[in-house]
Amino acid sequence: MKKNTFKKMAGIAAIVMSAGIFAGCSTATTKSEGNTATGNTIKIGVNMELSGAAAGYGQQQKQGIQLAVSQINKDGGVKVNGKKKKIKLVIRDNKTATSTSASVAAQLVNNDKVSAIVGPATTNAGTAEIPTITKAEVPSVSPSATDPDYTLKKNGKVQPYVFRACYQNNFQGSTAAKFTYNTLKAKNVAILTDNSSDYGTGLTKAFKKTFKGNVVSSQTFQEGDKDFNAILTAIKNKKIDAIYAPGYYSEIGLIIKQARQMGINVPIVGSDGMADPKLAQIAGDKNASKVYYTTPFSTTVAEKSKTAKQFMAAYKARYHAEAPTFSALAYDSVYMIKDAIQKENSTNSVKIAKGLAKTKNFDGVTGTITVDKKHDANKPIAVEQLTDGKVSASTEVK
């Protein structure tokens, strides 16, 4: 190769390399953040416990989600830039497993290109999806992940793409403690804790911190346990005025049944994991009396709200049953996302996250919701009482 030819080729190579460098810079600066909907539909993913241990909650939430989307689409859709876009759900089952939840999240944000996610129902499954949705910059609203640290990083800063439509365990546990002491006048209590989950241990911690009376006995059990006679025997002869048993209906239903069969008839107070008709089915209607639980949604209290009344009527018309708590929470989660999209006038997932963070005085079926700086939903709480397996009284606590 001649010298001047070499120089010419080298010059061309330099120009090509420079073009490549500038092209690379151009690509980096114009790359869109997150996922943005295309066409006339907005994809919303559902990462939900539709099978496995928490399927009872997941199935209820799926119904609430589908009802909300059907109503939004029937009304024309979500208004963005003067045009209405319909919502398309992409529903996937995380099987109440953390590893599956992580892979479901990856499918939703990377393959399905959803603009937002509803779910998971549980804190553990929700936590498992956080690294994936954060990297993809896609927000997720959990209807029912109540662990106080769920929306926070280890350094205490907020997770930018993690939100919830429910209150946290600290609020729920402290409310139960005040209700037990002030309303039930219980001065001495026994606590039965599901120590296999952050849900049970977190609620117990909050209850103990607030309760002004005496905790005369603390017993523990695990998810999946069937025989509670040993821990009930340990408290039977204690002078107790009430039992605090935060947990899920599957175990608490059996605890109520076995406690009553053993002759322990004091009030049993629990948490929103009991807010399911299956609780009375497991315990037996006769045994499910003097049973109380904190809940973000009470049909009795909801009768005073026009928004909640419309939801309950629509739910009954579609599913031929009374609207449960977890369906109401999921329903609100969808409408919170719709509100964020319209507020930001965008289907871009990063902007939707910003819109969710600005949620203020949102008229939800579970109450008026304001999202605080920790991405927690500030809202009212209620305590429901069961008598013969049916809700006999309900009190809203503000």
Image (tube, grey):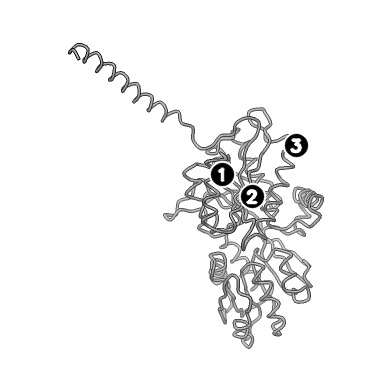
The image shows residue 116, relative to residue 29, as above or below, that is: below
Q: Residues within 10 Å of mark 3 (few under 14, many from 20)?
A: few
**Disc 1/disc 3 C-alpha distance (Å):** 26 Å
| Three-letter residue code for mark 3 | Asp
Give the label on residue 379, or none.
none
Q: Where residue 376 sits in the image (x, y, percent)?
A: 56, 52
The image shows residue 43, relative to residue 46, as above or below, that is: above
Disc 1: which residue = 108
The image shows residue 30, relative to residue 184, as above or below, that is: above
Q: Earlier in the sequence, mark 2 or mark 1?
A: 1
Q: Where residue 187 sits in the image (x, y, percent)?
A: 62, 79
Q: Quadrant of residue 341?
A: top right
Q: Residue drawn 52% across and 52% down? A: 102
Disc 3: which residue = 75
**Disc 2/disc 1 C-alpha distance (Å):** 27 Å
Q: Residue drawn 57% across and 68% down? A: 200
The image shows residue 346, relative to residue 173, as above or below, that is: above
Disc 2: which residue = 369
